[in-house]
Amino acid sequence: MDVGRFAPSTTGSAHPGTLLAALLCWLDARSRAARLVLRLEDLDPQRSSPARVEAMLEELSWFGLEFDAVGRQSDYAAEHEQALDSLAERGLLYPCRCSRTEIRAAGERTPDGGFRYPGSCRDRSLPKAGWRHCDEPLRMRLEPGVVSPPEEGGGSLAQDPHAAYGDPVVRRRDGAVAYHLASVTDDRAAGVTRVVRGRDLAATTATQVRLLEALDAPIPIHRHHLLLLEPRGDKLAKFHGAVGVPELRETTSAGALCGLLAMACGLRDRSDATSPSELLGDFAWECVAERDRVMVWDGRALTLP
Protein backbone atom coordinates (compact mmCIF):
# COMPACT_ATOMS: atom_id res chain seq x y z
CA MET A 1 0.00 0.00 0.00
CA ASP A 2 1.18 3.51 -0.80
CA VAL A 3 1.82 5.80 2.15
CA GLY A 4 1.58 9.57 1.89
CA ARG A 5 2.26 12.20 4.48
CA PHE A 6 1.45 15.80 5.27
CA ALA A 7 4.07 17.44 7.46
CA PRO A 8 3.25 21.03 8.45
CA SER A 9 5.47 23.00 10.80
CA THR A 10 3.82 23.98 14.07
CA THR A 11 5.37 27.43 14.33
CA GLY A 12 2.05 29.22 13.80
CA SER A 13 -1.51 28.81 12.61
CA ALA A 14 -2.45 27.11 9.36
CA HIS A 15 -2.97 29.63 6.55
CA PRO A 16 -4.47 29.25 3.05
CA GLY A 17 -1.21 27.88 1.64
CA THR A 18 -1.06 25.28 4.41
CA LEU A 19 -4.64 24.22 3.72
CA LEU A 20 -4.15 23.98 -0.04
CA ALA A 21 -1.08 21.76 0.45
CA ALA A 22 -3.00 19.63 2.96
CA LEU A 23 -6.00 19.37 0.63
CA LEU A 24 -3.97 18.23 -2.38
CA CYS A 25 -2.01 15.76 -0.28
CA TRP A 26 -5.26 14.39 1.17
CA LEU A 27 -6.96 14.13 -2.24
CA ASP A 28 -3.92 12.37 -3.71
CA ALA A 29 -3.87 9.77 -0.92
CA ARG A 30 -7.60 9.17 -0.73
CA SER A 31 -7.94 8.86 -4.54
CA ARG A 32 -5.34 6.06 -4.40
CA ALA A 33 -6.68 4.36 -1.28
CA ALA A 34 -3.29 5.14 0.25
CA ARG A 35 -2.52 5.45 3.94
CA LEU A 36 -2.09 9.09 4.96
CA VAL A 37 0.06 10.19 7.90
CA LEU A 38 -0.04 13.61 9.54
CA ARG A 39 3.38 14.46 10.97
CA LEU A 40 3.47 17.67 12.99
CA GLU A 41 6.93 19.20 12.75
CA ASP A 42 7.61 20.46 16.25
CA LEU A 43 11.41 20.39 16.53
CA ASP A 44 11.94 24.18 16.60
CA PRO A 45 12.32 24.82 20.34
CA GLN A 46 11.87 28.58 20.01
CA ARG A 47 8.82 28.76 17.73
CA SER A 48 6.89 25.54 18.32
CA SER A 49 4.84 24.69 21.40
CA PRO A 50 2.30 22.06 22.53
CA ALA A 51 -0.45 24.68 22.16
CA ARG A 52 0.49 25.31 18.54
CA VAL A 53 0.58 21.59 17.84
CA GLU A 54 -2.96 21.21 19.18
CA ALA A 55 -4.10 24.27 17.25
CA MET A 56 -2.81 22.84 13.97
CA LEU A 57 -4.66 19.58 14.62
CA GLU A 58 -7.90 21.43 15.33
CA GLU A 59 -7.56 23.70 12.27
CA LEU A 60 -7.05 20.79 9.87
CA SER A 61 -10.02 19.00 11.43
CA TRP A 62 -12.18 22.13 11.08
CA PHE A 63 -11.30 22.24 7.37
CA GLY A 64 -12.58 18.68 6.94
CA LEU A 65 -9.39 16.61 6.77
CA GLU A 66 -8.82 13.37 8.65
CA PHE A 67 -5.72 11.20 8.74
CA ASP A 68 -4.95 7.53 9.29
CA ALA A 69 -2.21 8.28 11.80
CA VAL A 70 -1.07 11.39 13.64
CA GLY A 71 2.36 11.91 15.16
CA ARG A 72 4.84 14.56 16.13
CA GLN A 73 8.33 14.86 14.76
CA SER A 74 9.63 14.84 18.31
CA ASP A 75 8.26 11.29 18.61
CA TYR A 76 11.11 10.16 16.34
CA ALA A 77 14.01 11.28 18.56
CA ALA A 78 15.42 7.75 18.79
CA GLU A 79 15.32 7.37 15.00
CA HIS A 80 17.09 10.73 14.58
CA GLU A 81 19.90 9.61 16.87
CA GLN A 82 20.21 6.31 15.04
CA ALA A 83 20.48 8.18 11.74
CA LEU A 84 23.27 10.37 13.12
CA ASP A 85 25.01 7.25 14.45
CA SER A 86 24.82 5.68 11.00
CA LEU A 87 26.23 8.76 9.27
CA ALA A 88 29.01 9.01 11.85
CA GLU A 89 29.95 5.36 11.38
CA ARG A 90 30.34 6.02 7.66
CA GLY A 91 32.61 8.99 8.33
CA LEU A 92 30.14 11.44 6.82
CA LEU A 93 29.70 13.83 9.77
CA TYR A 94 31.90 16.76 10.68
CA PRO A 95 31.59 19.80 12.97
CA CYS A 96 31.28 23.24 11.41
CA ARG A 97 32.25 26.52 13.05
CA CYS A 98 31.33 28.76 10.11
CA SER A 99 28.96 31.63 10.79
CA ARG A 100 26.19 32.72 8.44
CA THR A 101 28.15 35.89 7.77
CA GLU A 102 31.16 33.87 6.63
CA ILE A 103 29.02 31.69 4.38
CA ARG A 104 27.37 34.75 2.81
CA ALA A 105 30.80 36.31 2.29
CA ALA A 106 31.76 33.39 0.05
CA GLY A 107 29.09 34.73 -2.30
CA GLU A 108 27.87 31.48 -3.88
CA ARG A 109 24.11 31.60 -4.45
CA THR A 110 21.88 28.52 -4.19
CA PRO A 111 18.84 27.67 -6.36
CA ASP A 112 16.47 28.83 -3.61
CA GLY A 113 18.17 32.20 -3.21
CA GLY A 114 20.31 31.37 -0.18
CA PHE A 115 24.07 30.95 0.02
CA ARG A 116 25.99 27.77 -0.68
CA TYR A 117 28.17 26.35 2.05
CA PRO A 118 31.72 26.53 0.62
CA GLY A 119 33.09 23.54 2.55
CA SER A 120 35.44 25.48 4.80
CA CYS A 121 35.27 22.89 7.62
CA ARG A 122 34.97 19.80 5.43
CA ASP A 123 38.32 18.39 6.55
CA ARG A 124 37.50 18.56 10.25
CA SER A 125 36.67 15.42 12.23
CA LEU A 126 34.28 14.60 15.02
CA PRO A 127 35.70 14.53 18.54
CA LYS A 128 36.94 11.12 19.66
CA ALA A 129 34.03 10.94 22.11
CA GLY A 130 31.58 11.07 19.19
CA TRP A 131 28.99 13.43 17.77
CA ARG A 132 27.01 13.58 21.02
CA HIS A 133 29.90 15.41 22.65
CA CYS A 134 30.19 18.04 19.93
CA ASP A 135 28.79 21.49 20.76
CA GLU A 136 29.03 22.79 17.19
CA PRO A 137 26.61 22.29 14.27
CA LEU A 138 27.18 19.07 12.35
CA ARG A 139 27.22 18.77 8.57
CA MET A 140 27.13 15.74 6.30
CA ARG A 141 29.65 15.28 3.52
CA LEU A 142 27.68 14.91 0.28
CA GLU A 143 28.93 12.83 -2.59
CA PRO A 144 29.30 14.99 -5.71
CA GLY A 145 27.29 14.02 -8.76
CA VAL A 146 23.85 14.50 -10.27
CA VAL A 147 20.81 12.95 -8.59
CA SER A 148 17.57 12.45 -10.55
CA PRO A 149 14.72 11.89 -8.07
CA PRO A 150 11.48 10.49 -9.49
CA GLU A 151 8.98 13.33 -10.13
CA GLU A 152 5.47 12.22 -11.00
CA GLY A 153 4.44 15.62 -12.29
CA GLY A 154 6.74 15.35 -15.27
CA GLY A 155 9.28 18.01 -14.36
CA SER A 156 12.93 17.33 -13.68
CA LEU A 157 14.41 17.27 -10.18
CA ALA A 158 17.89 16.43 -11.51
CA GLN A 159 20.59 18.27 -9.59
CA ASP A 160 24.07 17.93 -8.12
CA PRO A 161 23.16 18.92 -4.55
CA HIS A 162 26.79 19.23 -3.47
CA ALA A 163 27.46 21.73 -6.24
CA ALA A 164 24.16 23.54 -5.71
CA TYR A 165 24.04 23.81 -1.91
CA GLY A 166 27.15 22.27 -0.40
CA ASP A 167 27.08 20.00 2.62
CA PRO A 168 23.84 20.34 4.64
CA VAL A 169 23.57 20.89 8.37
CA VAL A 170 22.10 17.75 9.95
CA ARG A 171 22.25 18.79 13.59
CA ARG A 172 21.97 22.40 14.71
CA ARG A 173 24.02 24.23 17.31
CA ASP A 174 21.17 23.95 19.84
CA GLY A 175 21.22 20.15 19.49
CA ALA A 176 18.03 19.86 17.44
CA VAL A 177 18.12 17.64 14.37
CA ALA A 178 18.00 19.81 11.26
CA TYR A 179 15.08 19.79 8.82
CA HIS A 180 16.49 17.65 6.00
CA LEU A 181 17.69 14.78 8.16
CA ALA A 182 14.59 14.82 10.36
CA SER A 183 12.29 14.80 7.34
CA VAL A 184 13.90 11.86 5.55
CA THR A 185 14.36 9.88 8.76
CA ASP A 186 10.72 10.32 9.66
CA ASP A 187 9.61 9.37 6.13
CA ARG A 188 11.66 6.19 6.33
CA ALA A 189 10.26 5.30 9.75
CA ALA A 190 6.67 5.80 8.53
CA GLY A 191 7.22 3.88 5.30
CA VAL A 192 6.36 6.90 3.15
CA THR A 193 6.24 6.09 -0.58
CA ARG A 194 4.70 9.33 -1.90
CA VAL A 195 5.66 12.93 -1.10
CA VAL A 196 3.19 15.56 -2.34
CA ARG A 197 4.22 19.13 -1.54
CA GLY A 198 4.61 22.66 -2.88
CA ARG A 199 7.08 23.39 -5.64
CA ASP A 200 9.06 25.72 -3.38
CA LEU A 201 10.57 22.56 -1.86
CA ALA A 202 11.49 20.96 -5.19
CA ALA A 203 14.98 22.47 -5.33
CA THR A 204 16.13 20.66 -2.18
CA THR A 205 14.74 17.24 -3.13
CA ALA A 206 18.10 16.05 -4.44
CA THR A 207 19.76 16.88 -1.11
CA GLN A 208 17.17 14.79 0.70
CA VAL A 209 17.66 11.91 -1.74
CA ARG A 210 21.40 11.96 -1.00
CA LEU A 211 20.56 11.64 2.70
CA LEU A 212 18.18 8.76 2.00
CA GLU A 213 20.88 7.02 -0.03
CA ALA A 214 23.37 7.43 2.83
CA LEU A 215 20.84 5.83 5.17
CA ASP A 216 20.09 2.97 2.75
CA ALA A 217 16.46 4.11 2.68
CA PRO A 218 14.02 3.78 -0.26
CA ILE A 219 13.37 6.87 -2.39
CA PRO A 220 9.72 7.97 -2.50
CA ILE A 221 7.91 9.26 -5.57
CA HIS A 222 7.58 13.05 -5.50
CA ARG A 223 4.95 15.38 -6.89
CA HIS A 224 5.26 19.14 -6.52
CA HIS A 225 2.27 21.45 -6.96
CA LEU A 226 1.42 25.12 -7.39
CA LEU A 227 1.76 27.71 -4.64
CA LEU A 228 -0.47 30.47 -3.35
CA LEU A 229 1.24 33.85 -3.55
CA GLU A 230 0.91 37.26 -1.99
CA PRO A 231 0.22 40.16 -4.40
CA ARG A 232 3.92 41.11 -4.35
CA GLY A 233 4.83 37.61 -5.53
CA ASP A 234 6.12 36.01 -2.33
CA LYS A 235 4.76 32.66 -1.22
CA LEU A 236 2.00 32.83 1.37
CA ALA A 237 3.82 31.84 4.55
CA LYS A 238 3.73 32.25 8.32
CA PHE A 239 7.04 34.11 8.05
CA HIS A 240 5.40 36.79 5.90
CA GLY A 241 2.42 37.10 8.22
CA ALA A 242 -0.10 35.28 6.02
CA VAL A 243 -3.63 35.37 7.42
CA GLY A 244 -4.26 32.37 9.64
CA VAL A 245 -7.26 30.15 10.21
CA PRO A 246 -8.29 31.91 13.47
CA GLU A 247 -8.82 35.17 11.56
CA LEU A 248 -10.41 33.47 8.57
CA ARG A 249 -12.93 31.64 10.74
CA GLU A 250 -14.34 34.95 11.94
CA THR A 251 -15.77 35.67 8.47
CA THR A 252 -15.47 32.43 6.45
CA SER A 253 -16.89 28.93 6.77
CA ALA A 254 -14.76 25.85 6.13
CA GLY A 255 -16.89 25.07 3.07
CA ALA A 256 -16.49 28.53 1.58
CA LEU A 257 -12.74 28.43 2.11
CA CYS A 258 -12.51 24.96 0.57
CA GLY A 259 -14.47 26.17 -2.45
CA LEU A 260 -12.15 29.14 -2.91
CA LEU A 261 -9.06 26.94 -2.69
CA ALA A 262 -10.60 24.43 -5.13
CA MET A 263 -11.11 27.26 -7.61
CA ALA A 264 -7.59 28.59 -6.98
CA CYS A 265 -5.99 25.28 -7.93
CA GLY A 266 -8.26 24.54 -10.89
CA LEU A 267 -10.44 21.81 -9.39
CA ARG A 268 -13.58 23.94 -9.74
CA ASP A 269 -14.63 26.75 -12.09
CA ARG A 270 -16.57 28.50 -9.33
CA SER A 271 -15.89 29.16 -5.69
CA ASP A 272 -19.10 27.59 -4.41
CA ALA A 273 -18.80 26.08 -0.94
CA THR A 274 -17.66 22.48 -0.93
CA SER A 275 -15.66 20.01 1.17
CA PRO A 276 -12.63 17.77 0.68
CA SER A 277 -14.86 14.69 0.50
CA GLU A 278 -17.02 16.31 -2.21
CA LEU A 279 -13.93 17.13 -4.26
CA LEU A 280 -12.68 13.55 -4.06
CA GLY A 281 -15.24 12.05 -6.45
CA ASP A 282 -13.74 13.50 -9.62
CA PHE A 283 -10.26 14.43 -8.43
CA ALA A 284 -7.45 14.02 -10.97
CA TRP A 285 -4.04 15.67 -11.08
CA GLU A 286 -4.67 16.55 -14.72
CA CYS A 287 -7.25 19.05 -13.46
CA VAL A 288 -4.89 20.77 -11.05
CA ALA A 289 -3.47 24.03 -12.38
CA GLU A 290 0.28 24.32 -12.80
CA ARG A 291 0.57 28.10 -12.44
CA ASP A 292 0.80 29.70 -9.01
CA ARG A 293 -2.17 31.82 -7.90
CA VAL A 294 -2.27 35.13 -6.07
CA MET A 295 -4.65 35.45 -3.11
CA VAL A 296 -5.56 38.68 -1.38
CA TRP A 297 -6.70 39.20 2.21
CA ASP A 298 -8.11 42.67 2.80
CA GLY A 299 -8.80 42.21 6.48
CA ARG A 300 -12.34 40.99 5.89
CA ALA A 301 -12.30 38.54 2.97
CA LEU A 302 -9.95 36.31 1.03
CA THR A 303 -10.22 36.70 -2.74
CA LEU A 304 -8.66 35.62 -6.03
CA PRO A 305 -7.87 38.75 -8.09
Image (cartoon, helix red, strand yellow):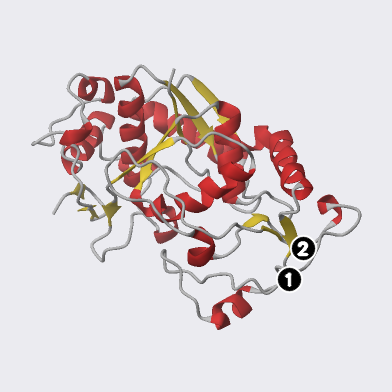
Mark linked to residue 136: 2
Q: Residue 49: x percent and y percent?
A: 61, 43
Residue 31 drawn above or below residue 289: above
Q: Quick check: 217 left or right of 68?
A: right
Residue 1 drawn above or below residue 262: above
Q: Quick check: 188 left or right of 154?
A: right
Q: Quick check: 111 left or right of 90?
A: left
Residue 296 drawn above or below residue 154: below
Residue 208 drawn above or below residue 95: above
Q: Which corner quadrant holds the N terminus?
A: top left
Q: Residue 300: x percent and y percent?
A: 24, 49
- Comparing 184 with 49, the one in front is 184
Q: Residue 288: x percent and y percent?
A: 20, 38
Mark linked to residue 260: none
In the rendered structure, which amino acid carries the disc numbered 1? Arg
Mark linked to residue 97: 1
Q: Which corner quadrant holds the C terminus?
A: bottom left
- Helix or strand or loop: what does disc 1 sit on? loop
Image quadrant where residue 286 sits: top left
**C-alpha distance separating marks 1 and 2:** 6 Å
Image quadrant where residue 141 sits: bottom right
Number of numbered discs on residues: 2
Q: In the rendered structure, are the residues bearing label 1 and label 2 in contact, judged by CB atoms less than 8 Å apart?
A: yes
In the rendered structure, which amino acid carries the disc numbered 2? Glu
